[in-house]
Image (cartoon, grey):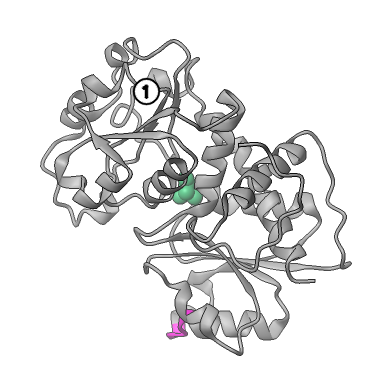
Amino acid sequence: MALSTDKISLKHLLTVEALTDQEVMGLIKRAQQFKRGAVWQPKKSQYFVANLFFENSTRTHKSFEVAERKLGIDSIEFDASTSSVTKGESLYDTVLTMSALGVDALVIRHSEENYYNQLIQSKTVHCSIINGGDGSGQHPSQSLLDLMTIYEEFGQFNRLKIGIIGDITHSRVAKSNMQLLKRLGAEIYFSGPLEWYEQKFEVYGHYLPLDELVPKVDVMMMLRVQHERHDGKESFSKAEYHQEYGLTVSRSQKMKHAAIIMHPAPVNRDVELADSLVEGLQSRIVAQMSNGVYMRMAILEAILEGRV
Ligand code: CP
């Protein structure tokens, strides 16, 4: 698909389904421009964005913060553990407060899937919402930075073969990525423990044993084992997982020469992939983290431009 030259404007960023193909490609293009040094010319002299993280985060939280600073936005920090959340204040009332204070947009990560429904239906809340991850639901900004990284490498998505491997059931990144990549023409293949694979994913691609998948795909998208969502019930040790479902060094040698390794991180080294592969030649894991800043600049610009 050709890149659009239109400026993108968004009210909220909640799911990838709500984005048109043109918006996805427009955001990728704009993120690439920011990476090359483009500067935002805001229509207003001051914008406030608050980062409300109710689940732990390093990359998403801090790359939104860096993106906000690079754009000259007034970034409002919020620590749930020292806020009135500790007195029982709900997410809705926290957001209502931010809106009353004049905050333009909120980046929210929360353990509840679709937490944003009540917020966007409110007539009193006027903030734009950027979903920084909702439970096992979606992670649209991660998906967009993943697509930017793939686009940088291959210049297109059509007929690219993408392997999504691991804890798919609990991965919001996987859900966002399978939807967007399929829509943009990529062929999706899944692998990993069958207990973390669901029939509903077959709409987007097909399950293959890992050793069949590895030599076939252009992108090995490894997923983090989400120990915190398994209630302590896992039927294999870390070493067993690595041997059976992980990208071991010997499996990596069966990859196509031009294939790349991706992982949203944090990586469980020597579980999802061998320690030595994380910063290896075929890995784009560090590039994903760097691209995250530029993609989040593009998202923030699109959201704030949409408010004027
Ligand atoms: N990839 C990702 O969402 O990382 P964090 O949980 O550190 O934000």
Amino acid type, callout 1? Val
- Compared to 278, does 174 lie above or below? below
Q: Which image quadrant is residue 168 in?
A: top left
Q: Residue furthest left?
A: 235
Q: Position of residue 236 (x, y in %)?
A: 13, 37
- Compared to 44, does 269 lie above or below? above
User: What stretch of residues is rendered in magenta?
Assistant: 87-91
Residue 63 seen in this snapshot: no
Task: Indicate left or right for 8 with 195 as reference.
Answer: right
Q: Which image quadrant is residue 72 in?
A: bottom right
Dominant SS in magenta: loop
- Compared to 90, does 173 lie above or below? above
Quick one: 80 or 98, which is closer to the camera?
98
Q: What residue appears at the point 57 percent right and 79 percent down from the top-left corner?
A: 95
Quick one: 75 or 171, which is closer to the camera?
171
Quick one: 69 or 105, which is closer to the camera?
105
Task: Indicate left or right for 188 with 180 as reference.
Answer: left
Q: What residue appears at the point 51 percent right and 53 percent down from the top-left corner?
A: 140
Q: Position of residue 39 (x, y in %)?
A: 84, 46
Q: Position of residue 153 (x, y in %)?
A: 57, 24
Q: Is residue 90 inside the magenta stretch? A: yes
Q: Residue furthest bottom?
A: 124
**Quarter of the image that includes the N terminus:** top right
Q: Position of residue 261 (x, y in %)?
A: 43, 25
**Quarter of the image that includes the C terminus:** bottom right
Residue 108 seen in this snapshot: yes
Q: What residue appears at the point 69 percent right and 63 percent down from the top-left corner?
A: 303
Task: Indicate left or right for 181 with 103 as reference.
Answer: left
Residue that mark 1 sits on: 217
Task: Look at the numbered disc 1 and give the secondary structure of its residue.
Answer: loop
Q: Is residue 270 inside the magenta stretch? A: no
